[in-house]
């Protein structure tokens, strides 16, 4: 499975831990994130992840910024992208199960690194339920 990851200055340590877990599980990872805590603009790291997911170059994406909101807003502008902001394992389950999210957005300033790793593991191992949720997902994208 191919995963694209991007982060701003709030997430280098989160990214390192998540990438280590992904590689240990055999995932192919494309890293668009910064490795520095020097201030950068989250869209510069979110757009490449969203492009990969939108164009089918990655199966899933992971984005990280301070609140998780700005980078989620950024990636959700792309066609075929459904990013869910997650602050708990339970939310990570629901964004996959009910919303068929293909990008997880992590708020680095509001979660711990172990929590973020657990959310990503949960996100990637949860299948979309389909059924009654499919009709709702079909209505998400704008024409």
Image (cartoon, helix red, strand yellow):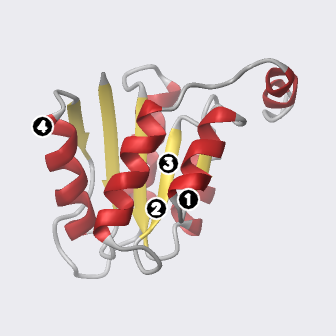
Residue found at x 86% / y 30%? 136
- Do residues under tags 1 and 2 come within 8 Å of each other at their CB atoms? yes
Give the alpha-carbon distance from disc 1 to disc 2, as whole Å: 6 Å
Q: Are marks 3 and 2 in contact (CB under 8 Å)?
A: yes
1 or 4: tag closer to the N-terminus: 4
Location of mark 2 (residue): 106
The kind of secondary structure element at disc 2 is strand
Disc 3 secondary structure class: strand
Q: Earlier in the sequence, mark 2 or mark 4?
A: 4
- Residue at coordinates 51% horizontally, 32% vertically from top-left? 126
The alpha-carbon separation of the residues under discs 4 and 3 comes to 19 Å
Name the image quarter holding the N terminus: top left
Q: Earlier in the sequence, mark 3 or mark 1?
A: 1
Mark 3 highlights which residue?
104
According to the picture, the residue beneath numbered tag 4 turns out to be 24
The image shows residue 28, relative to residue 31, as above or below, that is above
Q: Which mark is residue 86?
A: 1
Q: Are marks 3 and 1 in contact (CB under 8 Å)?
A: yes
| Residue in the foreground of this view, choosing between 6 and 131 | 131
Between the residue at mark 3 and the residue at mark 2, the CA separation in whole angstroms equals: 6 Å
User: Which residue lies at the image location 59% right of the left edge and 67% below the top edge?
Assistant: 69
Q: Is residue 97 above or below residue 71?
A: above
Q: Which quadrant holds the C terminus?
A: top right
Q: In the figure, residue 97 lies in which quadrant? A: top right
């Amino acid at each position: 499975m191919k995963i694209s990851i991007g982060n701003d200055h709030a997430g280098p340590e989160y990214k390192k831990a998540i990438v280590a877990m992904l590689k240990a599980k055999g995932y192919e990872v494309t890293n668009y994130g910064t490795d520095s805590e020097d201030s950068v603009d989250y869209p510069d790291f979110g757009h490449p992840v969203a492009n990969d997911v939108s164009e089918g170059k990655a199966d899933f994406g992971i984005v990280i910024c301070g609140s998780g909101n700005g980078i989620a807003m950024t990636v959700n502008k792309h066609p075929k992208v459904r990013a869910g902001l997650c602050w708990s394992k339970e939310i990570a389950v629901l964004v996959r199960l009910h919303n068929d999210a293909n990008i997880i957005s992590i708020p680095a300033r509001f979660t711990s690194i172990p929590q973020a790793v657990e959310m990503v593991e949960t996100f990637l191992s949860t299948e979309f339920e389909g059924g009654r949720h499919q009709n709702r997902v079909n209505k998400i994208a704008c024409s």
